[in-house]
């Protein structure tokens, strides 16, 4: 009964009774639906890959020029969602370490907790500084952050006044 | 400002999402579809409210959503083409007892769905008793029986 011509006619001919149809519009709708499904699947795959924070595409590591400071962070974050960052201080122990977060960074993120806790915190025109007592190296510091602004943000973290590590974050609204 | 923008973003996203997913996706409310809709609602709520649980925020969001819905309905009224685009158009699936299979396949409706609608709304037993089956904009199937 059903042939290719018959199928084609079904999809092309618009009826006006009992309702008014528009089959060309309907076929366009179906096509758009299919594109939409592909887009949704792509979105899901990208989310799994970490484009929207927490995943391989998102995790990044930055190391200072002399290799003393290593930062493991997420390139992508979401506004208001908790975000983790690990700072690893290499090199010789015995001296206190001073980490300085540049102003744009402290403005973008609220720092919720630091483990182990710093011995001292200092505010300043160039941002906030955290002082950690002399300890064995490497020393791993875990920061729990919460982004408070959306879109693209840049900042710097430096150790003991050495050349800073520039960081770029994209924060989804 | 934030509340209005949040509501607008969610409204637009859901509008597009439900248009893309097709009218049949969540139309026949089975128990599972119902649960799925509730979960979607829960997930939406978090994003819309943010961390502001004040009554004012809730008022603003509800007002924004209703305003957008009214605006959309006015827009659809003035620009019928936009209405068609947003809601789609009804389509005949069965004509004089003959199922239009090419259409049914595209619309993801099978004969069981049509016969279920026929039984429920008209008490019909056979495809031959159906004059027209129409897939409505809402995703439901209307049955017009043969006299």
Image (cartoon, rainbow, N blue to C red):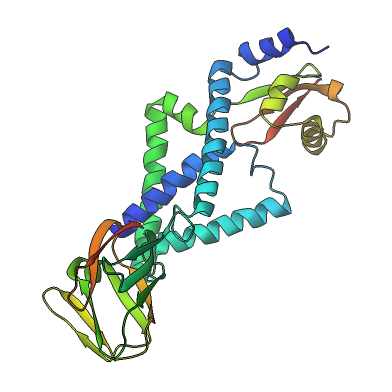
Can the viewer see residue B76? yes
Q: Quadrant of the N terminus of chain A?
A: top right
Q: Answer with left or right where residue A6 lies relative to residue B50.
A: right
Question: From the viewer's perspective, is residue B94 above or below residue A103?
Answer: above
Q: Answer with left or right where residue A50 lies relative to residue A132.
A: right
Can the viewer see residue A15? no
Q: Nearer the viewer, residue A15 or B1?
A: B1
Q: Answer with left or right where residue A124 lies relative to residue B31.
A: left
Q: Residue A130 placed where, x, y %?
A: 25, 83
Q: Nearer the viewer, residue B140 or B24?
A: B24
Q: Residue furthest right?
A: B125
Q: Residue A156 placed where, x, y %?
A: 23, 66
Question: From the viewer's perspective, is residue B133 above or below residue A55?
Answer: above
Q: Residue at x 64, y 36 (%)?
A: B139
Say how many tags the image has. 0
Q: Nearer the viewer, residue B128 or B111?
A: B111
């Amino acid at each position: 009964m059903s042939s290719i011509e018959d199928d084609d006619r079904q999809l092309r001919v618009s009826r006006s009774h009992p309702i008014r149809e528009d089959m060309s519009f309907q076929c366009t709708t179906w096509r758009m639906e299919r594109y939409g499904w592909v887009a949704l699947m792509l979105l899901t795959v990208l989310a799994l890959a970490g484009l929207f924070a927490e995943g391989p595409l998102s995790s990044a590591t930055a190391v200072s020029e002399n290799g003393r400071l290593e930062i493991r962070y997420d390139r992508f974050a979401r506004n208001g969602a908790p975000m983790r960052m690990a700072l690893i201080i290499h090199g010789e122990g015995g001296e206190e370490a001073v980490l300085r977060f540049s102003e744009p960074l402290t403005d973008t993120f609220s720092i919720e907790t630091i483990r182990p806790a710093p011995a001292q915190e200092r505010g300043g025109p160039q941002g906030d500084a955290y002082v950690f007592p002399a300890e064995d190296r490497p020393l791993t510091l875990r920061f729990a952050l919460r982004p408070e602004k959306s879109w693209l943000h840049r900042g710097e973290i430096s150790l003991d006044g050495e050349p800073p590590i520039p960081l770029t974050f994209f924060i989804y609204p | 400002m934030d509340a209005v923008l949040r509501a607008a973003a969610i409204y637009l996203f859901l509008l597009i999402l439900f248009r893309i997913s097709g009218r049949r996706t969540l139309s026949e409310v089975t128990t599972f579809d119902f649960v799925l809709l509730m979960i979607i609602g829960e997930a939406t709520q978090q994003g819309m409210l943010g961390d502001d649980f004040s009554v004012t925020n809730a008022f603003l969001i509800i007002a924004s959503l209703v305003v957008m819905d009214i605006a959309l309905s006015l827009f659809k009224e003035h620009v019928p083409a936009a209405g068609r685009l947003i809601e789609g158009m009804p389509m005949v699936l069965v004509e004089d007892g003959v199922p239009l299979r090419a259409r049914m396949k595209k619309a993801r409706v099978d004969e069981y769905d049509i016969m279920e609608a026929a039984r429920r709304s008209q008490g019909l037993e056979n495809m031959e008793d159906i004059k027209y089956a129409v897939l409505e904009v809402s995703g439901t199937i209307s049955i017009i029986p043969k006299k």
